[in-house]
Amino acid sequence: MKESMRTWQERAENILAQGCLTYSKSRRYYAKDQPSHCKSGRGQYLILPDGSTCLDTVSGFGANLIDLRNSFSLPATLEVEYAERIVQRLGVPGWKVKLVKTGSEADQCATRFARGFTGRKGVLKLGYSGWHNEFIAAEEPGIGCIPTDVIKCNDYKDLISHLESDNPAPAAVIMEPVQLDMDVVQHLKRIRDLCNKRHVVLIFDEVITCFRMPQYTVSATYNVWPDLLTTGKAAGGGYPLGICMGHKDIMDTEGVFVSGTFSGETSALLAGMEVLDRVTPSVMSFFFARCQDFQTELQWAVKEHISILGYGTRQVLRDKVEGSLAVPRYMQEMWNRHKILIGPVLFPRVGWDTEIYGKIINASEDVMKDFDQVTLNGSAPRPIFKR
């Protein structure tokens, strides 16, 4: 057993930032001869890597009130295996990982590592970076949030202008590398060069774009790599999973505290493993191309009234004529006539087959036949905040 434990702990130190996901479950917390990892739990016992069992009294640090089934008092070997696979699929050899529960948490994690590594506080942000205080405080209205050292940039040119200015260098740039327009590679290269020049940690927030690009990420698709990359959402297949990964020198910064009772719970990690099993490189490439074709077909069907922005795997619907309420009227009629739930943003799924794509196109063409006579029932939907 002791040799097996040493092996798992060595793997954890090689792939997980600071050697663990949850500090209270780490090797540092327990005595030298106690086990470092478990495989699973059953009833009131932990199953160790060698198949033996031990009675657990720590109860997942208070989380397991009834029995042990999903979150344990020791790190699960699954978190090490998943971290190794996700870096192999999405990252760069030598990168390290912190697994959390949401993309917002991953973004917060990344900025914390950047601040710790650089010793600076300021952050430049482009796009949505999650709902935590430091990011929402930079948005309007930001009610209830304490102002921070995060500066919101309006577009790529605004961000580049900040980096080219004589102002003190920030700790980090955190940005969605692609929002709606994919023709941004030159901007990304310029930002990468400026961050290198000013020793600024570059963070790509790929919570939306990851598993929606031809090579999984914008980073890989355009071969422009950040220092830290965050993702979530699709990576967990609908289960709560956020990922922060990047250069080990930054991720292993001493004293940066990132932890959480449920960081290594196993249901989300198993879901993440299934996503990696099912969404192979060939599947990803085919999915992106199929969605691009679907976007073209859908745009043709609604072309008189609605513009579809973005890219195939993430389509944003906008009124072609401002104030026409075309999008909410389309949403309404797709539901009333065909029981298809449409929102202002459309995310195709890998599980869609030809019938599903065809059903949406055919229904859209039907709605558009008499669209000029359609009126909106009730008030127009209102977004929570502007992107």
Image (spheres, helix red, strand yellow):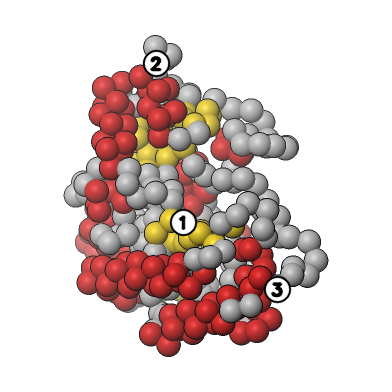
Of tags 3 and 1, the one toward the viewer is 3
The three-letter amino acid code for the residue at tag 3 is Gln
| Residue located beneath label 1 in the image | 309
In this view, the residue in front, 7 or 308, is 308
In this view, the residue in front, 86 or 381, is 381
In the picture, measured across the screen, residue 99 lies left or right of residue 16, that is: right
Of tags 3 and 2, the one toward the viewer is 3
Mark positioned earlier in the residue sequence (3 or 1) = 1
Disc 1 crowd, CA 10 A, few/some/many (<14, 14-19, 20+): some
Q: Position of residue 73 (x, y in %)?
A: 48, 61
Under circle 3, the secondary element is helix
Q: Is residue 290 above or below residue 247?
A: below
Q: Position of residue 264 (x, y in %)?
A: 45, 60
C-alpha span from label 1 to label 2: 32 Å
Under circle 1, the secondary element is strand
C-alpha span from label 3 to label 1: 25 Å
Query: Does the image show residue 201?
Result: yes
In the picture, measured across the screen, residue 42 lies left or right of residue 49, that is: right
Q: Residue furthest bottom?
A: 355
The three-letter amino acid code for the residue at tag 1 is Leu
Disc 3 crowd, CA 10 A, few/some/many (<14, 14-19, 20+): few
In this view, the residue in front, 262 or 290, is 290
Q: Residue at x 54, y 25 (%)?
A: 149
Disc ID at residue 361: none
Q: Is residue 46 above or below residue 254?
A: below
The image quarter containing residue 17 is top left
The image quarter containing residue 50 is bottom left
Q: Residue furthest left?
A: 93
Under circle 2, the secondary element is loop
Q: Residue at x 43, y 56 (%)?
A: 310
